[in-house]
Image: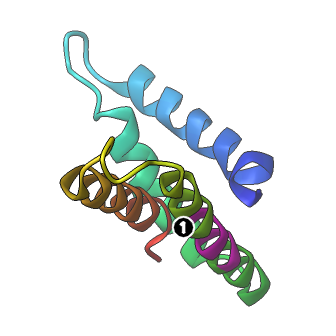
Amino acid sequence: MFYNTKLKAIIEDNYSKVEKSLPEGAKPPGKAVFRNKRLKELLETEAADIHKEVDEFIVEHKKQAVAELEWADAEEVGEEEVAHRNKLCDRQVYVLFDY
């Protein structure tokens, strides 16, 4: 995926520079918060074909997540748990790819 082949290295480098630039004792931003913010910024600058690739990844990721939940017998995993897992999946995809 595009994140692994290009953006991950850029974001990790940016985070490292932020950490090194902080005054002694200062706490850096959380890695996930920093990553998601930079990811959104970097994706906004990409071409339409990259946006299409990301959109297709989101659709496939959601299909896979739903398929993984289908193994669960309704008696073993209640509706609340299934709803909770779906919400987590949607939030993860939204945070990473809401551009």
Residue 47 lies, in percent from the top left, at: 73, 83
Q: Nearer the viewer, residue 22 or 68?
A: 68
| Residue 18 relative to residue 79: left or right | right
Quarter placement of the N terminus: bottom right
Q: In the image, what residue type sits under mark 1?
A: Lys
**What kind of secondary structure does the magenta stretch mostly adopt?**
helix
Q: Residue furthest bottom?
A: 48
Q: Residue furthest top?
A: 25
Residue at image position (43%, 73%) is 98
Q: Nearer the viewer, residue 19 or 74?
A: 74
Number of residues whose C-alpha sits closer than 10 Å to that of mark 1, classed few (under 14), some (14–19) or many (20 or more): some
Q: Is residue 72 magenta?
A: no
Residue 14 lies, in percent from the top left, at: 54, 39
Magenta part of the protein: which range? 56-62
Q: Nearer the viewer, residue 89 or 4?
A: 89
Q: Residue furthest front?
A: 75
Residue that mark 1 sits on: 62
Q: Say above or below: 71 vs 44.
A: above
Residue at image position (60%, 63%) is 61
Residue at image position (38%, 65%) is 90
Residue 49 lies, in percent from the top left, at: 78, 84
Helix, strand or loop at mark 1:
helix
Residue at image position (48%, 54%) is 69
| Residue 89 relative to residue 75: left or right | right
Q: Say above or below: 80 vs 29.
A: below
Residue 10 lies, in percent from the top left, at: 65, 45
The chosen color scheme is rainbow
Q: Nearer the viewer, residue 94 or 37?
A: 94
Instruction: Count every numbered label the image shows and give the total.
Output: 1
